[in-house]
Structure formats: structure tokens, C-alpha cells
Image (cartoon, rainbow, N blue to C red):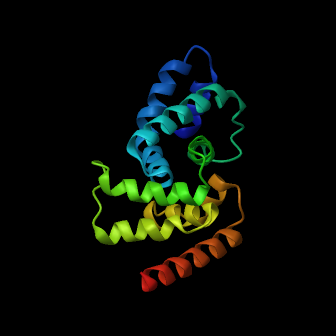
Amino acid sequence: MIAEETLVQELQREESRSKAFEVLVNTYKERLYWHIRRIVLDHDDTDDVLQNTFIKIYRNIEKFKGESKLYSWMYRIATNESLTFLKQKSRKMGISDQELKDKMVENLQADVYFEGDEIQLKLQKALATLPDKQKLVFTMKYFQEMKYNDISEALDTSVGALKTSYHLAVKKIEAYLKEN
């Protein structure tokens, strides 16, 4: 595997960008896919958002300053693309963000790519009740097992705020699961 610093240098040079971008996609596509999938839930929508994410990364790689890790920068782009996609989708459908979240969880049962059981479906329903920030933090910490420092870089938020968001998310999920 190529070192991140070397990869960034290769991406920012015109003559090596195409080959380096292929390496970047192959290195990060699965991690980014699952990050996006946990936000948008639907496989086809995830593929669309992932493609948009890589396009945005390609178009903006020259602006990457190296002030954070490359994957943190890409996670931030993927997160923003996911949230924008969901907002646009709810607007197109003429429904609220919460109605869209509920509909997405309902559709998850029919999704051939969803391999979860009843408990995982219940967890998804609980996650749908959380504000976006708490859902993101919980997802990145619980499912992706990211460290608070890495989440902080990806979401551009302090570690203290993340710990609070995670704690609140856990309490809300526990309460939801007890009630349902």
C-alpha cells in the first residue's frame, strides 16, 4: 500500500493523477461505501453518492492542504454528499427529513442487500429518530469503530462535543429500544 503523503503528492501532480486516483479509489472505496451506506441506507443511492464523492475528491484534490488525514478529508466530503443527497431527496419527494428517514428504514426490509436481522432493523429504526449529527457520531464510533480524534477530523468538531453527541445518541437509542 502506498503511503498517504506519497499518494497525495501523486494526486496533485497532473502527470500521475489518473493512476494515483485509481489507487485512491481501490484503497478507500469499500470504507467510504459503508460510511455512506450507513447514512443513506439504500444500496443504489449509496452507489450514486459514492460516485459523486469520488468526483468531488478528484475535482478538489489540488485544494487538499494536508492539515488533516486524507481519509478524514474524504469522509467529510462523503458525509456532506450523503446529507445533501438526503435533503434533496426529501425535497423532491415533498416530505420532511424525518418522513424520509422513516421511509428509508421501511425500504430497508425489502432491500436485497440488507443482511440484517430483526434486531438490526430495530436499531436502524432507533437511529432514524436521532438528529443527523448524533446519528453520524454514533455510526462512526459504533459501526466503524473510529477513534474520537479521527471522527473529530472527519466532522470538524471537537472531541468533547463528539463524546457528548455519542452519549446522547446512546441514551436515545436505549430509550427507543425499551419502548419498542
Residue 71 image-quadrant placement? top right
At 59% from the left and 40% from the top, the residue drawn is 92
Residue 47: give x, y in percent of width and height: 43, 37
Q: How many circles with numbers are drawn on the protein?
A: 0
In the image, what residue occupies the spot 62% across and 53% down?
154
Snapshot quadrant of residue 44: top left
Q: In this view, does 178 lie above or below 73?
A: below
Please give the name of the residue rendered at 45% of the width and 54% of the height, measured from the top-left corner.
Answer: 104
Q: In this view, does 67 lie above or below 107?
A: above
User: Residue 45 at x, y = what percent?
Assistant: 45, 41
**Is any atom of residue 75 visible in this view?**
no
User: Foreground residue, 5 or 152?
Assistant: 152
| Residue 132 point in image, percent of width and height | 61, 60
Side of 58 where 23 appears, left or right: left
Considering only vertical position in the picture, is 160 above or below 61?
below
Q: Where does the image place residue 165, in percent across and percent down from the top left?
A: 64, 72
**Quarter that holds the C terminus:** bottom left
Residue 7 in view here: yes
Q: Which residue lies furthest to the top in this view?
A: 15
Who's the residue at 35% across and 67% down the image?
120
